[in-house]
Amino acid sequence: MSNRAAWRLESLGFTRVHHYTPGKDGWLTMGLPTEGPDAATPRAGDVVDRVPLACGLHDRLGDVRDRLRAAGETSSIVVNDQRVVLGRVRGDALDGDPEQVVEAVMEAGPTTVRPSAPLEALIARMQKRKTGSIVVTTATGVLFGVLRREDGERRLAERKG
């Protein structure tokens, strides 16, 4: 809630009050829990894989490829020490020289969405563009997870059925 509203509640004797100045949109963008009529709306943050494989700019491509294969995955998110998303490595790029660093072959600045993105519209967009997954970040660019289209479709089907 807003800082003003939080202070008002405290003045009325409430003790469990959170001062959150970025407001409702900021709260949703961080993937934090919600209440009220919109709480039932499925959002990207509800379905993401919160622990996707990630690597650093200077990791060896061969090491990343080995980790991906062992996990049955096809891509890795490239992050810095604060887990800010810098890129993504996948596809033919993984077939490169195993001694090469990820930075040399990554896709810089991949498309990202926020955890607050309504799932139904996002999945429709992914279907239209034939996208299998999308990177989900906080407003500050920190990796929140990866949304796989099939997981989102399954969630929406469960909700309707």
Image: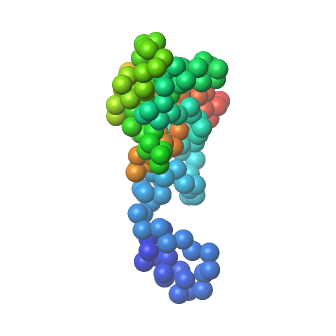
The structure residue drawn at horizontal position 47% and vertical position 67%, both measured from the top left corner, is 20
Residue 48 image-quadrant placement:
top right
Q: How many marks?
A: 0
Q: Could you say where residue 19 lies in the image, as x and y percent from the top left?
A: 49, 72
Indicate whether 98 appears above or below 35: above
Please tell me which residue lies in front, 112 or 160.
Answer: 112
Tell me residue 159's x, y (percent). Answer: 62, 35
As drawn, is 153 to the left or to the right of 26? right
Q: Nearer the viewer, residue 34 or 160?
A: 34
Residue pictured at 39% horizontal, 37% vertical = 86
Figure colour scheme: rainbow
The residue depicted at 59 percent of the width and 40 percent of the height is 50
Q: Position of residue 110 (x, y in %)?
A: 37, 32
Say whether residue 129 is visible.
yes
- As drawn, 148 above or below 143: above
* Residue placed most toward the observer, 28 or 161: 28
Q: Point out the residue furthest to the front here.
A: 99
Residue at 64 percent across and 20 percent down: it is: 70
Observer able to see residue 117: no
Is residue 145 positioned above or below 148 on the image? below
Percent x, y of residue 124: 44, 27
State left or right for residue 23 relative to residue 156: left
Compared with 133, 46 (above or below) is below
Please identify the quarter of the rendering in which residue 103 is found: top left
The C terminus - image quarter: top right
